[in-house]
Amino acid sequence: MTDQPADALADDQLQAPFGEGSVYGQFCPIAMAAELLATRWTLVVLGEMLSGSTRFNEIHRGVPRMSTALLAKRLRELEAAGVIARQGAGYALTPAGRDLAPIVQGLGRWALRWVDTNCSLGNLDVRLLMWNVRRNLRTDPMPPRRVVVEFLYPDLAPGEQRFWLIVAPGLPVDLCSLDPGGEVDLLVTADLRAMTSAWMGMSRFTDEIRAGQIALDGDPALAAGFVSWIGLSGLALDA
């Protein structure tokens, strides 16, 4: 399947293990889906691809605790099954892969609805949070010029404390973990748990700001519009 356009697989049936090669040994469609999708990290990788990542390094930034060797293995397995296909220097979801969107997103929303918030917020990861904030930032409410927003998490280790989002007209939002230089338009000082909770829709940004867990300093217009442009997780129940 190497380098086939993703849509070339539109009429293909996916190949799942069966017989002695099967994990479950059942003809049940749920078991057959699990043969392909229930391996460790697979659904998380698919979630990252459904969010728009296509190149290996992009996908890995969305699953930073996954080894690159295991990621490469899972991508090969998904390609062999017909869920993704090579496309140029990256990967693309096939029609079968894109058809998983409501299922993967539904699992995420189910977890938000039913899994205890403290369990989710016990797995904080600032780099993963900022990677996703970058992706869902709403640029339309921001000024039509280059804008630099610095995020400071003072309770974290020095190498994890500071991140910069750079927004420029006509360009993708850029995330830096090294000071890009120049003037910062807005400084966001935050508690990581509070920032994660609000971005996931578990709490509200306005409440976290009022409680002093998130502070905004700098351009008054940017600060006033923070809630309108910061965005939310695509899985947030009120996104």
Image (cartoon, grey):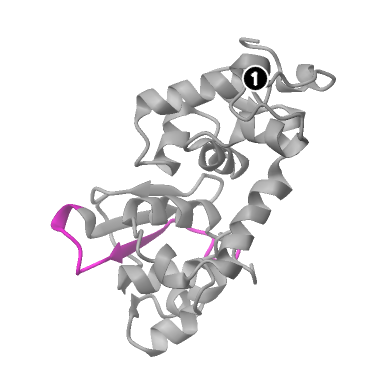
With respect to residue 178, does 78 lie above or below? above
Magenta span covers which residues? 140-159
x%, y% of residue 169? 53, 51
Name the residue rendered at 35%, 64% in the picture: 122
In the rendered image, the quadrant that contains the N terminus is top right
Relative image position of residue 180 (x, y in whole percent): 27, 49
* Magenta part, dominant SS: loop
Q: Quadrant of residue 153?
A: bottom left
Q: Residues within 10 Å of mark 1 (few under 14, many from 20)?
A: some
Of residues 11 and 49, the one nearer the viewer is 11
Q: Which residue is located at x 40 percent, y 71 percent?
A: 118
Q: Amino acid at mark 1?
A: Pro
Nearer-the-camera pick, 201 or 18: 18
Badge 1 marks a residue whose secondary structure is: loop
Task: Report whether residue 87 is seen.
Answer: no
Is 115 magenta? The answer is no
Inspect this view and state whether residue 162 appears.
yes
The residue identified by callout 1 is 17
Q: Is residue 126 left or right of residue 113?
A: left
